[in-house]
Image (tube, rainbow, N blue to C red):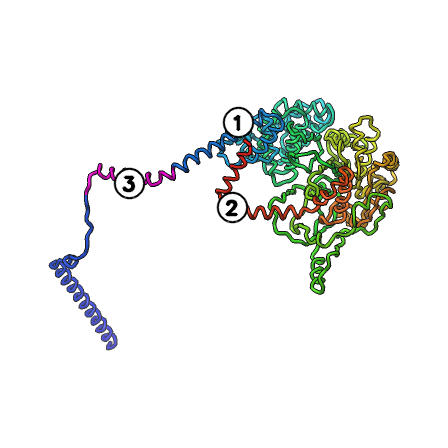
Amino acid sequence: MQIEYKRVTKLFSGCGVASLLGVLSYEAYRTYAALTSLVDTRVLDIDRKRPDYIYIKHHIYRQSLREQAASEENRHRLMTAIVQPFEKWWKALKHSVAWRLLRIAQQGDQAERLKAVQQLAQIDHLKDWDFQHLAQLCDYQTAISLARCHSDTRWFLPPRQYGVLLSMREVLGEMKSLLELLAPHKCAVYALEQTFGSSGHIREPDGDEVTYQMSPSRFEYDQLKQSLSALVHLTGLMGEEGQENCRRIIESGGLLQLIEVEKLFQNDIDMKLLVSRVVANLSAFEGRGYEFFASGWLHILARWKRDVDMRIQVTADLTLENLDQDDPNGFRYAPKVYPLHPRGRQQAKPAVDVVFIHGLLGGVFVTWRQKDLKPQAASLLEGIASYEDELLTFQESTTPKRRDPSISDTETKELIEALQQEEPLGSDWSVVYPDVPLAGDEAPAGKSSSSGDAFSVSGEQWLQEPLDAGQRSFCWPMEWLPKDFPNIRVIGLNYDSSLSQWSATGCPCEKYDGKLEKRASEFLEKLATSNVGQDRPIIWVGHSMGGLLVKSIMVQALESSDPRVRRIAENSKVVMFLGTPHRGSSVAKLKQHTSALVWPSTEVRELEENSTQLLHLNKTFLRAVDHLGPRKPEIISLCEGRPTVLTSFKVPIHVVPESSARIDAGDFYLTSEDHLNLSKPICRQSFLYQRLVGAIQAAIREQQGPEMKEDIKSHVTPQAHVFTRRNTSGASSALSGLYTQLKQFEQLMNVFI
């Protein structure tokens, strides 16, 4: 009890102290408030400066503003009197020059038109509305010329309603109507039955596949792809059949219908390739430039010239060159003939034609690739499986980057650095090519001596090799040869082939009729149409079955009564065979039960070992070449020295053995590569590429005479051109904007001089 009493006492004592403190605080606050109300504290601020306000009338304020503006105007009147008229005159001059150049491009003679188009292509400083106005005044021929000169895309009007997309079924209906126009042809009838069914209507997908209105189903996608593939074949036929098919498609508005497909699949590389091939085939039909211009295809082609995929770029260049009727140095290319270089207007005709023909299951952008620095097991199906849906980039060397001087590996570079540390190397050291042949038989009295040292390169040239170790070429003839020989023409021939009838194309006229002679005859007509070898030498490069096509082309050309066709064989200066089965291949010979299961294609059966047809072709070719006498072409043969490892069976096999690759004429080299990598050099200093460079040099020397030797040598050193461009770009970056305008003014004034 005593303890509880003490606790209560302490509690009451604490509450009393707290109450007393609260009363004292309250009384202190009341006292302070009373004193504050009695004393005026503002008297302490009597010395502080306060703002003074002067009230003026509104009209006086406005008058002062006018006087201030007038003084500012008088201050800058002298500068305005000088700059403003110059600015107005400069803008008027730019506009008047563009209009005057356009008038010259439309009404002048050929020389004036070419010069005016060249000047117009350099104009990129006008406003959008200026380009729109100029594009509306532009005629179709001038627009085609501007598109070929890589000019600003604002020069070209887009197709009508380009932003409006049709549904997938509407586009399928338009493709079906195009095939029905060509229905008398058996391939068109076959395509209609296979794609749309015997009922003639667009088929519905089988099963429970769900479709959406905005995105096409896989079934509709495959239907459209089959339709476009059929159009590629039907428009690419030679003779009157192909011309009649192109005429029907163009006159029925097929170009506008193809634009609808392009709008739906702008980011689909497979669909873009099919559409571009159809358009390229239609461009081979002469005199249809206005239809391409009116439909808006020039806007799309000008954009395709800047596409990241080189196949789209090449196809767009081919189409525009076929449409261009104002180029004195231009050509007309038949279907499946791809101009890899040059890809624009040139000042003169090419000095040499270099023609590349791939082998079985190959392609222009498959066979002629740079060798992968990380090799994997090869596949005979490389043209179908390995490169499907792959983006093939192509970068021109306009802005050279810092590159690794190493060519094939780092071991050689490390070895050279170690040798230089011990003792500096002299000026006569050399590096052996990375793909040096294992053995070589050169003709004692042939033309092989023109290639110089066939197995090595000087050390200084090796160190200057501008090959980027991280960049791989998807078509080395297109990227490397123009650097060494800017004045030549590089052509790639393309054709479809298959290993089995099961995987062959569905067209009845091609599925069972892949005869070597027929295909060579078609290519011979296309080459004559493209003006190949008419007034310049030809260099042939054929890989595998492509070499057999070269032989058949030359034999048929020499047997022709047409002088234009005969000149193709008579002007052939070099024939390079890369793994060509002159006597067939053992791979093509299958057992009876395996043959029944695989059902080999016609191309495979034609390559059987010791085939009567191949032996007869070889004898006929050698006999025909001997009849040319002094104009006999130089023959170079490269054979695989390593078996090809097939990914399907993991079995190393020699596709074309040495006994079949020997043609018993010219130079023969046994390389260290397998069959598929035989056409893929590892770098520009490889033996294959340098041997071809030597052959081209010899052909140009023979064509142009000894006085051109120094000029030819200058073409083989592209590093000097790269160095010049680098210095020029560095200097131009330091110039001011005023200097740039003065340079533009100088270019514009050149038109009046």
Left or right side of 533 for 727: left
Residue 76 lies within the magenta run: yes
Q: Which residue is mark 2?
A: 735
**Which tag, 2 or 1, sits closer to the chain's start?**
1
Select label 2 or label 1 by which is in front. 2
Determine the CA span between mark 3 and mark 1: 48 Å
Q: Which residues are magenta?
A: 55-80
Q: CA distance from mark 2 to mark 1?
A: 35 Å
Q: Which mark, by number, is residue 53?
A: none
Kind of element beneath mark 3: helix
Q: Taking the image as drawn, is residue 566 in sight?
A: yes
Give the SS element for disc 1: helix
Residue type at tag 2 = Leu
Task: Name the residue tied to disc 3.
Answer: 68
Sequence-first disc among 3 and 1: 3
Amino acid type of disc 1?
A: Gln
The residue carrying mark 1 is: 136
